[in-house]
């Protein structure tokens, strides 16, 4: 069945083992981020079996699906009001930056007769989730006093929104904040979660301060890539995912549309067309409803991706050495956004290869 995304599970597990070993050499625990897998229990089960310390996901629905997996589970997006009961029920830990949410988690944990662990998020410059220093100090004091909340740790997130990378300066700042709060409140954070895959370089260079004892990683593990730096990690596999789709139309046509031109296409975009004369065009059965178009690159470098619509991608195969036929399969290397969209689309078959 096409379209499909082929997943090399052994490659992913190999990457996890190597990353975990590197983390251990630095006194750091590894929380594997599973959100990219969009509730693929078979893969997540294999990840848990490989012996990871924690798994984390941004969607509570996914953690509900993983409820029987024997591993500590973290919700890495702060829960919305309606998600609070399931967060307490199915997540051991959640990342938080709002006192009202933590108070509600505490109430719910009381109702469920449980202790819920929270990691408070500190804003280190990437400008997504997290409290600035004075608020963090107040939040720490408040969270400590709640009967059914365990103040588990402190965390930061980088390189997801503002393209801010970890550096010796911001890691030192995090270290200072941790030490200051521990001293002020006479506590010890069990977890200091210092970032994600973008910390890989600092990890390799043993530059992460010893106060930081955890990293949450996705992209490095799945794609062997350091986000923000756009650098390949040589020691890790980069080809764990391949996207495949079938040619459903193959014809010679002019390269510029003709007729009266409107303002935009079906996605509200305006395109310009280069006149290359008559070209051999292949349409594949994969579209923008299945994949982020600029998140995939054809393995055949001579293919030109012309564009697409919800259900079709249009390719120019005129310059290819290979003589493509109707029904042939075109393969693509996806980046992070490409994998995320294909894994999330119910129309793309997930084929696990071991
Ligand atoms: C809070 C949080 N932590 C960690 C990660 C993992 O990031 P990366 O895939 O870059 O390792 C993400 C993104 O998925 C995230 O939102």
Image: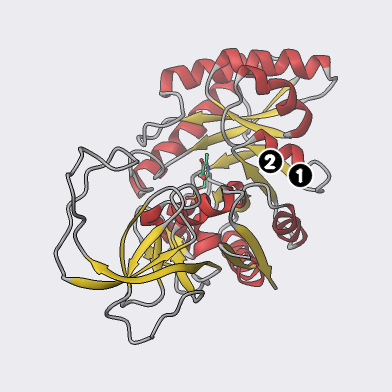
Q: Position of residue 235 (x, y in %)?
A: 50, 74
Residue drawn at (35%, 49%) of the image: 167
- Going by the picture, which residue comes out furthest to the left? 275
Residue at the spot of label 1: 66
Q: Tag on residue 51?
A: none
Image quadrant assignment for residue 278: bottom left
How far apart marks 2 and 1 lie (CA) works out to 6 Å
Q: Give the image's coloring scheme.
A: secondary structure
Residue drawn at (45%, 74%) of the image: 234
Label 1 crowding class (10 Å Cα cut-off): few <14, some 14-19, many 20+? many
Q: Position of residue 30 (x, y in %)?
A: 62, 53
Residue at the spot of label 2: 62
Q: What element carries label 1?
A: loop
Residue drawn at (40%, 56%) of the image: 295
Which quarter of the rendering shows the N terminus? bottom right
Q: Within 8 Å: ligand 1 and the Cβ of disc 1?
A: no
């Amino acid at each position: 069945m096409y379209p499909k995304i082929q997943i090399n599970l052994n490659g992913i597990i190999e990457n996890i083992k190597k990353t975990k070993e590197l983390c251990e050499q630095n006194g750091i625990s590894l929380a594997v981020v599973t959100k990219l897998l969009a509730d693929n229990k078979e893969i997540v089960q294999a990840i848990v079996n490989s012996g990871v310390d924690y798994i984390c996901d941004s969607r509570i629905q996914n953690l509900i699906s993983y409820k029987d997996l024997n591993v500590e589970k973290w919700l890495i997006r702060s829960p919305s009001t309606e998600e609070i009961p399931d967060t307490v029920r199915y997540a051991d830990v959640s990342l938080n930056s709002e006192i009202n949410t933590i108070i509600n988690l505490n109430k719910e944990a009381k109702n469920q007769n449980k202790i819920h662990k929270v990691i408070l998020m500190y804003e280190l410059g990437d400008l997504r989730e997290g409290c600035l220093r004075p608020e963090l100090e107040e939040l720490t004091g408040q969270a400590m006093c709640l009967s059914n909340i365990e103040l588990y740790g402190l965390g930061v997130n980088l390189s997801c929104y503002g393209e801010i990378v970890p550096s010796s300066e911001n890691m030192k700042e995090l270290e200072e904040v941790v030490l200051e709060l521990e001293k002020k409140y006479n506590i010890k954070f069990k977890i200091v979660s210092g970032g994600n895959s973008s910390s890989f370089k600092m990890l390799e260079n043993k530059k992460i301060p010893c106060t930081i004892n955890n990293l949450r990683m996705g992209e490095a593990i799945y794609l062997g890539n350091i986000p923000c730096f756009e650098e390949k990690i040589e020691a890790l596999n980069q080809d764990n995912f391949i996207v495949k789709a079938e040619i459903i139309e193959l014809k010679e046509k002019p390269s510029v549309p003709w007729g009266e031109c409107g303002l935009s296409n079906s996605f509200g975009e305006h395109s310009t067309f280069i006149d290359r004369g008559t070209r051999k065009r292949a349409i594949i059965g994969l579209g923008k409803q299945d994949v982020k178009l600029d998140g995939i690159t054809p393995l055949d470098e001579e293919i030109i991706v012309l564009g697409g619509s919800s259900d079709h991608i249009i390719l120019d195969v005129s310059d290819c050495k290979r003589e493509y036929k109707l029904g042939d399969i075109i393969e693509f290397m996806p980046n992070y956004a490409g994998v995320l969209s294909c894994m999330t689309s119910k129309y793309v078959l997930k084929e696990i290869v071991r």
